Image: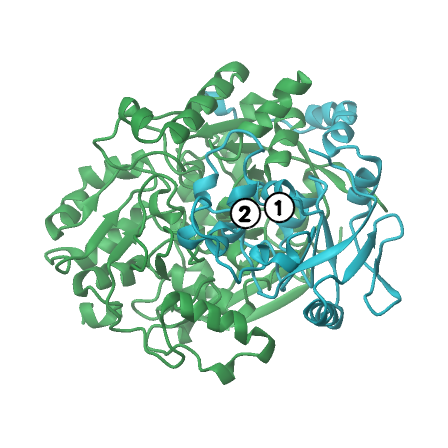
Amino acid sequence: MSRPRTLFEKIWRRHLVAAETEGLPATLYVDLHLVHEVTSPQAFTELAERELPVRRPDLTLATMDHSTPTDPSIDTAKLRVLDPEGSAQLDRLLANCERHGIPLYAMGDERRGIVHVIGPELGATQPGMTVVCGDSHTSTHGAVGALAFGIGTSEVGHVLATQCLLQHRPKTYEVRVDGRLQEGVVAKDIILAVIARLGIGGGTGHVFEYTGEAIRALDMEGRMTVCNMSIEGGARAGLIAPDDVTFAYLEGRPMAPAGYDWEAAVDDWRSLPTDDGAAYDRTTTLDGSALEPMVTYGTNPGMAIPIAGAVPEDDAIEPEKRASFRKALDYMALEPGQQLQGKPIDVVFVGSCTNSRYSDLVAAANVLRGRKVADGLRVLIVPGSDAVKRQAERDGLAQVFVDAGAEWREAGCSMCLAMNGDQLAPGQYAVSTSNRNFEGRQGAGGRTFLASPLTAAASAITGRVTDVREVLS
Amino acid sequence: MSRSFTRFTGSMAPLPIQNVDTDQIIPASYLKVTDRSGLASGLFSRWRYRDGDPEGEPISDFVLNRAEHADARILLAGDNFGCGSSREHAPWALVGYGFRAVISTSFADIFRSNALKNGLLVVPVTEDGSASLFEAVAADPATEVTIDLEAQTLSLPGGGETSFEVDPFARRCLLDGTDQLGYLLNQAPAIQTFEAAHPARLDTRSG
């Protein structure tokens, strides 16, 4: 009997082409490489300069999401005029994928969507796999029990050419969330509370494994929200052990195993969860039953407070961090000790690889149904994939949003990083379901309050930062 | 773009802010390029220029706009430098501007990995070490340090030196001026053997 191992260790060991030695990193095999238009062109150029083929186009999947318009009236021809640079980037991806035989979900393809939404949706990301992408939110796919992490463009080139990466073995960090969540508290609130606790560098050098009753009780899409923001806690990857919820989610999806292969796969996947007695390098525990809806006040995702709370006072901040704290408050035009609840806002954004899946839209629609968006407020609802969009249109969710006065958009990354023209104006405040409240992230001078889809929808009705429990009660 | 680093002596540009994210280093609006060049003007553009516009008015008190730091090629930054997005455009922009190294108490994992692949050395120092460097630069902006990658040492302004940690493989590549892809390509036989024993989990072309 081998010694007990963590989920991370089991996946890591299975993918070692060469183990790490003194002075040399491990060579780690990649089961699935996801590609998008922004971080891949220079990698393909590197291959072209060296006259290298793509080793495994059959393990590579490309989509267009970052630079794509979400305004339904903008087609490819219009985009060439409106955004020649973005359009050229999309063309480049198309040419690169054609040249190397890489499947690409281009504009107009009904499988297209945000890379971290379509991977699980297609059943392409599966338990026990290694998954990488030139995108830090690749951690999302850890929700199915895959070791998934973001890489730089040089590494995108490495994987295209060799299907491998040079990696040092990270440490493991158990993030345990016990108890049952209160009404109105959801996956997004868990992860914002985790990051507030650990700090945005707290997970550096580690892979998180989320455990505990509150995590087990989440559906798959909630688990994706949690794993998605592992990187905001400094961890390159976050994992959740696969269980019956995972298997039920994956069964029947287009790229998931089928028939006998499915039975064999599930048998294998059941061996993945961390063994009893396995040791993590670090562990932290949160009481899920004590969590409140969370909202950020500053310019990084660790600057989060319970929605009824107040911005910290100066003396609550360590002296050496005070200058950065004041810089953040200056940017946000907030004061120490200020309440966020009731703060007027200009925009609500429901979308991004964190919170744009069907269940996120259901949550928002349940709050907005039969209600109206506040006067003068702009509300964007941006589905994570074309499939999510079609399902929401079939099931009447889209109509709920339109009736409420929100904008119903095409799938894409949109205002999460504001590359495609969807952006805040300088000085505007947004409640956003995305993952980063960095200065200017959602548009130069824009100010972001990160929150859950429930909080976003409640705030859309009032035009102010609002506790969803007050709207629903 | 040079990917080598051996030894460098120069003055430092102090940026005493924690958690500098890669959106600040290079905003997303610059990510539409399809090559590695042309990013230097976007470096810290939202802090460097009024309205973030490189054609516009420079913000005079931002460190890169101060005459006494115009020649600095080492960035002295606060803790957890390079957090956030995986964009390699961040080190491309820093290198494009002319930076050879970043000194901080810690670096985000992906940024560190990206930087070392582009000849931009990341030099971790202790909190005390960092504080004394910031003090030295405040007292004399022309203060120089020497970073010696072969010896893994950083000379200190008051005399003496401190050693720093760096991934030994990345160090070897930087000293030799070789890149990591070449090393991986040489592992083709081992990769082939691995693939034979590790059947593909899916075929993306079947979707």
Q: In which quarter of the image is residue A83?
A: top left
Write down which chain is painted cyan.
Answer: B
Residue A233 x, y percent position in the rendering: 54, 60
- Of callouts 2 and 1, which one flags the residue occurring earlier in the amino acid sequence? 2
Left or right: A57, with A459 as reference point? right
For the residue pair A328 and A17, the one nearer the viewer reads as A328
Image quadrant occupied by the C terminus of chain A? bottom left
**Which residue is painted at 54% across and 17% down in the image?**
A100
**Which residue is painted at 72% across and 30% down in the image?**
B181
Residue A94 x, y percent position in the rendering: 44, 21
Left or right: A12, with A230 as reference point? right
Would you call the spot at circle 1 few (<14 residues within 10 Å), some (14-19), or many (20 or more)? many
**Which residue is painted at 10% across and 56% down in the image?**
A370
**Which residue is painted at 50% across and 35% down in the image?**
A263
- Chain of the residue where label 1 is placed in the rendered structure: B
Residue B24, numbered circle: none
Mark 1: amino acid: Leu
Element on which disc 1 rests: helix
Would you call the spot at circle 2 few (<14 residues within 10 Å), some (14-19), or many (20 or more)? many
Residue bearing the label numbered 1? B94
Number of marks present in the image shown:
2
Residue bearing the label numbered 2? B43
- Chain of the residue where label 2 is placed in the rendered structure: B
Write down which chain is painted green.
Answer: A
Q: In this view, does A100 lie above or below A200?
A: above
Q: In which quarter of the image is residue B179?
A: top right
Mark 2: amino acid: Leu
Q: In this view, does A278 lie above or below B200?
A: below
For the residue pair B38 and A262, the one nearer the viewer reads as B38
